[in-house]
Amino acid sequence: MKILGAILLGTVMVFAASGANAQTKNEKIPVSGNCGMCKKNIEKAAKTAGAKEAVWDIPTKMLAVTYNAKKTNSHKIQQAVAGAGYDTREIRGSDKAYEKLHACCQYERTKADTAVKQL
């Protein structure tokens, strides 16, 4: 009887753990920026939007995020990053936020793409 209970408990724990992993998403988002100061600001903005982990790679300009899909999503994370002045794949930061960036962080912006929403 104790063995059956232990097997049942183990099975329940395996299913619970697999359900928790289904909520976790990993994604890479292109984000414009230049330097280490940008890296700090971009990662901080992503985390304030609910990312558990956020790492922006300077050479590739890619933000790798891990987040709980029940608590946030890619769009919310991109909104926060754009709100800090950095253009993302889907959202262009406002000119006002961009102008507040330190001079070394003011990357070369392209013309507003019609497919990209402006924050």
Image (spheres, helix red, strand yellow):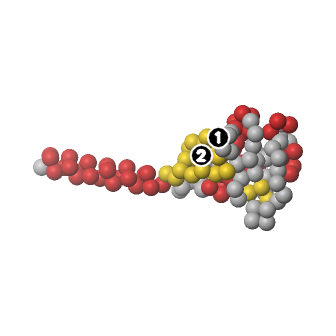
Count of residue discs: 2
Q: Is residue 48 visible?
A: no
Provide the residue designation for mark 2: 64
Between 29 and 13, which is closer to the camera in this rendering?
A: 29
Query: How dense is the environment of label 1, judged by Cα within 10 Å: few (below 14), some, or many (20 and up)?
Result: some
Is 59 above or below relative to 9? above
Q: Is residue 57 left or right of residue 109?
A: left
The residue at 59%/46% (across/down) is 64
The residue positioned farthest toward the left in the image shown: 1
Mark 2 residue element = strand
| Residue 20 percent location from the top left of the image | 43, 51
Residue lying at the far bottom in this picture: please name it: 114
The amino acid sitting under disc 1 is: Asp
Label annotation for residue 57:
1
Dot 1: element: strand
Q: Which mark is residue 104?
A: none
Residue 15 coordinates in the image, percent (x, y): 33, 54
Quarter of the picture holding the C terminus? bottom right
Q: CA distance from mark 1 to mark 2?
A: 8 Å
Q: Is residue 41 left or right of residue 66?
A: right
Label 2 sits on what residue type? Ala
The residue mark sitting in front, 1 or 2, is 1
| Residue at 70% over, 36% down | 40
Point 70% across, 59% down: residue = 90
Q: Are marks 1 and 2 in contact (CB under 8 Å)?
A: yes
Residue 79, image x, y percentages = 71, 54
User: Is 70 situated above or below 61?
Assistant: below
- Nearer to the camera, 45 or 5: 45
